[in-house]
Image (tube, grey):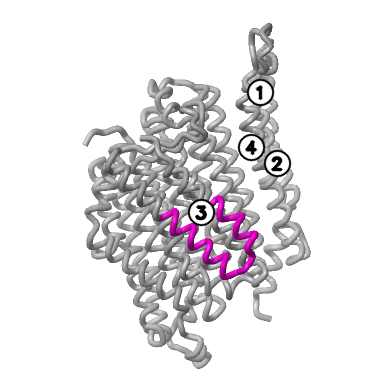
Amino acid sequence: MNTQLPVLVVLIPLLIAPLIVLVRNPTAAWALFGAAAVSSFALAVQCLLLVQEQGLLQAFLGGWEPPFGIEYRIDLANAIVLCLVSGIALLVTPMAKASIEREISEPRIYLFYACLTLCLTGLLGMAATGDAFNVFVFLEISSLSGYALIAMGNSRRALLASFRYLVMGTVGGTFFLTGVGLLYALTGTLNMADLAGSLTMGFDSRVLIAAAAFIVVGLSIKIALFPVHAWLPAAYAEAPSAVTAFMAATATKVAAYVLLRFAATVIGPVVVFATLPIGTALVWLACIAMVAGSIAAIYQTDFKRLLAWSSLAQIGYIVLGIGLGTDAGASAALTHMVNHGVIKCGLFVIAGVLVWRHGQATVANFAGMPQQSPWLFAAFVIGALGLIGVPGTGGFISKWVLLQALIAESAWVAVAAVLVSSLLAVIYCWRVVEIAWFGDSDASQPPPAASRTPVGATLSLAMLSGLVVYLGVHSSWLVELTAQAGADLFGVGR
Amino acid sequence: MILAHYNYWVVVLLMMIGLYTIMAHSNLVKKLLGLMMFQTSVFLMFISLGKIEGGTAPILTGDAVAYSNPLPHVLILTAIVVGVATTAVGLALVVRIHEAYRTIEEFEAIERDKRENQPA
């Protein structure tokens, strides 16, 4: 069905971004970002409902029919990703206000929100578009605004972190562009559905192999998969807290979705998983990422850096699902994108509250804090349980779906890696719990006046923690949705 | 055979020079130069894809038989804008890094962070 909905999801934040620059007032800028998030989320949910009803939403930009014009094409998989990205933006909004006022000097706040809205636009666009070159353009929109957002962090280390991310991210984006160019040379089309149709024969072409390699490597850099992850921990640790909460939950997930889309439909499972050993390589790299990321997280002293390394491990679960090359694996990846997005966003909001209070979030200073602010640390425990994958949280559901997919493929090494990584997650979460509850609180504790939580952050945190538990208890709809999305991606009838 | 595709050799050569510069240099401006060269190589690849031997500019005049494909040119116009924006953001970051660290050598900046973070 042809409708303008998919375009509006992306267009509204794109138009609000310059409006924020014109308005300049910090509070109005924040409100406009919130409005962009609300409207995108409402439209994304509308898209999801329509897709469930009709199967596919298409929008032809300028009325040009594909494959000549740019097409926005929404099926279940992108509808889920659109809802995740816009939903996270919505949930971060209440928290962002106080946190940003403390972390960024006032004259720059409106520019910050303009960048954040552009970043949202880019991520939504990557998910919504059905045109391979358009993916590159939106990838760069989200990345460029992301570099600026990370550089706005407080310490000068943020500048170096942002510069490194810029170099690696641009190399990744350019690799992706090279791959798209080779696909275009091969088929003469850039429309993703049309590409998928032209490449179904899975012919043994060297150009196709090169294109697949370029695209997978380029996207792996944006996903921060194991050997090309180096930009992520510093970038997440040094960025303003609201940015980390937003980007950790969305940026890498959208890149993972694009990888899934290209592997499963555009280039096709025959080339990616049968002709080339890309699937096997992804599975092994994901296993290394899961274990190594968790081990590195154990040794971190900074709370945000700990969470960033844990993100690397959790990204491993998502890539593992993609690397399996089955519809069950794809749906496990999508499930974990949603669950990990919600969990990690909540944990980074906690980090944001701590930075708001104390100017930093060092794990060693947590001693005695749970007594002062029991609710904040209750939320941390919920998030930590979700990371570990304890029943009753969303993390358990996605690990359960993933393990089922792994067992169906008899990928026993990967099963072992998932279990080891979960055990390591227990260790790095317990380290925080141990210091916070059982550590000696020294006399240099901050005065009780400093221990309140901004109202907005409380609101964000309450909703996110509630969502973690809700997705763990009432999860059947999400699992069914992602199972159908995975089946659709791989063209398996259900 | 090999020389017939010399444009792709140029692309690969530029790409490798760019990547090597990014990896080998500690100077941030040189890194950016490498990055630009790396991007430009891909632009060249797209542009040479559109060329058809004996083809003319895609203007309907009636007497031409073959037209070069204009679409890659349009794509690369967009990609050039992206590249310019990337370079601008990168250079702005280098200026800020120079203000904060008084150096544009990556290793020196990291050293300074380590030194100045240690309690005296």
In the image, is A199 to the left or to the right of B58? Answer: left
Residue type highlighted by circle 4: Thr
What chain is tagged by disc 1? B
First-in-chain label (4 vs 1):
1
In the image, is A373 to the left or to the right of A241? Answer: left
Q: Disc number at residue A134?
A: none
What chain is tagged by disc 4? B
Tell me whether circle 3 and circle 1 mark residues in contact (CB < 8 Å): no
Q: Which residue is mark 2?
A: B36
> Do discs 3 and 4 share a chain?
no
Disc 4/disc 2 C-alpha distance (Å)? 15 Å
Q: Which residue is mark 3?
A: A120
What chain is tagged by disc 3? A
Residue type highlighted by circle 2: Met
Give the main secondary structure of the magenta stretch. helix
Disc 2/disc 1 C-alpha distance (Å)? 18 Å
In the image, is A455 to the left or to the right of A17? Answer: left
Circle 1: is it few (<14), some (14-19), or many (20+) Cα within 10 Å?
A: some
Number of dots carrying numbers: 4
Q: Nearer the viewer, mark 2 or mark 3?
A: 3
Residue type highlighted by circle 1: Ser
Q: Nearer the viewer, mark 3 or mark 1?
A: 3
Label 4 element class: helix
Disc 2/disc 3 C-alpha distance (Å)? 26 Å
Magenta-span inclusion, residue A19: yes
Q: Which residue is mark 1?
A: B48
Q: Disc number at residue B78?
A: 4
Span highlighted in magenta in the image: A13-41
Percent coordinates x, y for residue A140 in the rendering: 58, 45
